[in-house]
Amino acid sequence: MTEEVPDCRIYSMLTSLINRIAGLTKPKAQFDPATLPWTDRPDFQQRLADKRAAGEISADEAAMLLQWDRDGFVVLPKIIEDNLIDALWRDEARAWQERPVCKMESEGTGVTMLSESKPKQELTHHHYRIMDFHNLSQAGAHIMMHPKIVRTLELLFGEQICAMQSLLFEYGSEQHKHQDFAYVHAQIPSHLIGSWVACEEAGPENGSLVYFPGSHKIPMFDFGDGNVLYTKHDPAKHDEFERHLDTECNRLGCEPKTLRAQKGDVLLWHGALVHGGGTTEDRNRTRRTFVCHYSTQRAYVKDRRSWDDEPKFINLNGGRYHAWQFAGHEEGRYFFDSLKTQL
C-alpha cells in the first residue's frame, strides 16, 4: 500500500531561499527533511509499528523494512525467472548484430551510439555497458518492473514508483566506491533506490558488487555551497568525495562486503549506500548484471533524456517508466513472446 505524502517542496525552497538571503543559516549538505521518504524520517520505527498494527504490512515486510533502515539494502533471492533473464541476453546479442538506436558507455570513449562502437570482440577492455536497454527489450522492461521489485519499492518509498534508467553489464564494472544520488539525479534527490539483478552467478571471481552496510547514514559530502549533487565536472571534487567516503566508512565501522549472488537474485540499495564494483579475479569470466535506478512518481516527472519534451509514460505492474523519445528509436523492439499481454 502507498500513503499520500504532501508536496512540501515549494514551501521548503522558499524557506531555504529566505533564510539564505537573510544570512540566518548556512547551507548544509543534506537532503531536504520535508521531502524524505518515510523510511528515512526520524519517526520511521513508530510509523512502521502503526502500519503493522493496522495490518497494512506483513511481519516479513516489517522485518525487511527494519533491515533496510539498519543496513541500507535488502536481497530478494531468486525472484527473477530464468526465461526473462535468458530472453534479455538473447536481445543483447541481437542488438550487437543489428545495432538499433541505442546508447552505450565505454571506457575511453564515454557515451556513444551502439552503432558507433567497434564489434564487441574487438573491444580491448570489459568496461562497457548498454544504457536503457529496457526501452528496446520487453524482457528487460519486465525485469525492471517485476511485480516483486515494484511491491518492495513501494514499501520502501511509501509511494508509487517510477523507473529512471537501466544499465546492462556483461562484465564487472570495477567502479570506484560512490553513492548513487550524487550522480543519478531525481527531482527530489532523496527519492532514489538502485537494483542489481544477477543474470548469472556472481562473486569475487568475476567482479561482483562491493557494498558497505550501514553507510547510507554517513554524513553527506558538500560539493560546494551545501550541494550534495555532483553537477559540475571537477575531478578534484570527485577524488575528494571518494576520500570522504573512505574516512566516514572507517569512522562508523562500515566494513566492505562482496555480494555472492545466484542467477535471479536481486539486491536493492539505498541511494546513499556506498558501493562499487569489485576487482575481477578471473578476467575471462563474465558477470552479467542488469542495474536499474528508481524514484517516485512525484519525484521523477521529467525524463532526464528529453527534459524539454512532454513525458510519455509506460505503465507496467503498478509502476511506470518513460518511453524514449529519440529519432529512429523503436520502443519495445524486441518482443518477449512469453508475455500474456503486450506493453
Image (tube, grey):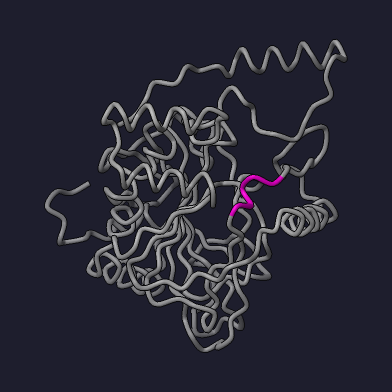
Q: Is residue 223 above or below residue 235?
A: above
Q: Position of residue 168 (x, y in %)?
A: 45, 64
Task: Write down the quadrant of residue 296 in the picture.
Answer: top left
Instruction: Specify the farthest residue to the right.
Output: 23
For the point 56% across and 46% down, the residue is: 271
Q: Position of residue 164 (x, y in %)?
A: 46, 44
Question: 132 or 241: which is nearer to us?
Answer: 241
Q: Is residue 166 above or below residue 55?
A: below
Answer left or right for 324 relative to 36: left
Q: Main secondary structure of the magenta part?
A: helix
Instruction: Specify the farthest residue to the left.
Output: 340
Answer left or right for 26 relative to 185: right
For the point 77% across and 11% down, the residue is: 18
For the point 25% across and 43% down, the residue is: 317
Task: Write down the quadrant of residue 178 in the picture.
Answer: bottom right
Q: Is residue 139 above or below residue 208?
A: above
Question: 169 or 43: which is nearer to us?
Answer: 43
Which range of residues does the magenta coloring cover?
214-218
Q: Quadrant of the N terminus?
A: top left
Answer left or right for 207 relative to 155: right
Q: Position of residue 321 (x, y in %)?
A: 38, 41
Answer left or right for 175 relative to 153: right
Q: Is residue 75 magenta?
A: no
